[in-house]
Image (cartoon, grey):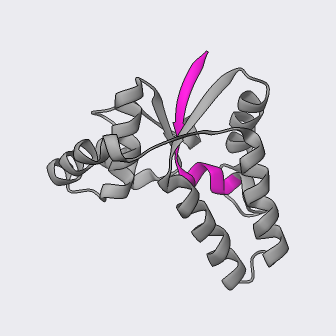
């Protein structure tokens, strides 16, 4: 079974309205694979803070209502994403951030995927451009 590290850019597509959301269909297929146990997903603790921020920001912008934001978090909890502590991966994340001049929170996902021998799935094109040729990253648009 394929193991993936999922970043918040992918999971946001599971909680936000699909209309106008790029790659929503690809994200939905991945979610189907996860819920049908054809793949497993892992996320760092940071993921949950990022998703809560995405939900908050979407409410602030009038894209969704507060009740939808709360339901989105509940939906994600039900997916059963294995949550991994960030502490063992911080040194590697910082080293990657410094070496590749990319945000440490993005590099945390890369560090986790490396440590777990998993593939990182992201909708963050800048992350794929910066690190995709060096590490096991898969852009959601190519999934």
* Image position, residue 73 (x, y; %): 73, 59
From where the camera sits, is residue 98 visible?
A: yes
Residue at image location 74% in from the left, 44% down from the top: 25
Q: Total marks drawn? A: 0
* Image position, residue 70 (x, y; %): 78, 67
* Image position, residue 29 (x, y; %): 74, 35
- Give the quadrant of residue 3: top right
- Give the quadrant of residue 16: bottom right
Q: Is residue 31 left or right of residue 124?
A: right
Dividing the image into 4 quarters, which one contains the N terminus? top right
Residue at image location 77% in from the left, 31% down from the top: 35
Between residues 25 and 80, which one lies in front from this camera angle? 80
From where the camera sits, is residue 18 visible?
A: no
Between residues 96 and 140, which one lies in front from this camera angle? 96
* Image position, residue 100 (x, y; %): 20, 49
Residue at image location 35% in from the left, 30% down from the top: 114
Q: Is residue 37 left or right of residue 52?
A: right
- Is 6 contained in the magenta span? yes
- Is 78 contained in the magenta span? no
Q: Which residues are magenta?
A: 1-13
Seen from this angle, which residue lies furthest left?
A: 99
Establish if 52 lies above or below 121. Answer: below
């Amino acid at each position: 079974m394929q193991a993936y590290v999922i970043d918040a850019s992918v999971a946001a597509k599971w909680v936000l309205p699909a209309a106008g959301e790029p790659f929503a269909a690809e994200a939905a297929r991945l979610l189907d694979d996860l819920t049908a146990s054809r793949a497993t997903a892992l996320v760092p603790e940071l993921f949950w803070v990022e998703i809560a921020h995405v939900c908050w920001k979407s409410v602030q912008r009038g894209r969704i209502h507060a009740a939808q934001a709360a339901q989105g978090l509940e939906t994600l909890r039900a997916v059963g994403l294995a949550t991994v502590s960030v502490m063992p991966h911080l040194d590697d994340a910082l080293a990657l951030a410094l070496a590749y001049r990319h945000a440490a929170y993005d590099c945390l996902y890369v560090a986790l995927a490396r440590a777990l021998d998993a593939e990182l799935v992201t909708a963050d094109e800048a992350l794929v451009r910066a690190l995709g040729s060096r590490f096991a990253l898969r852009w959601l648009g190519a999934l």
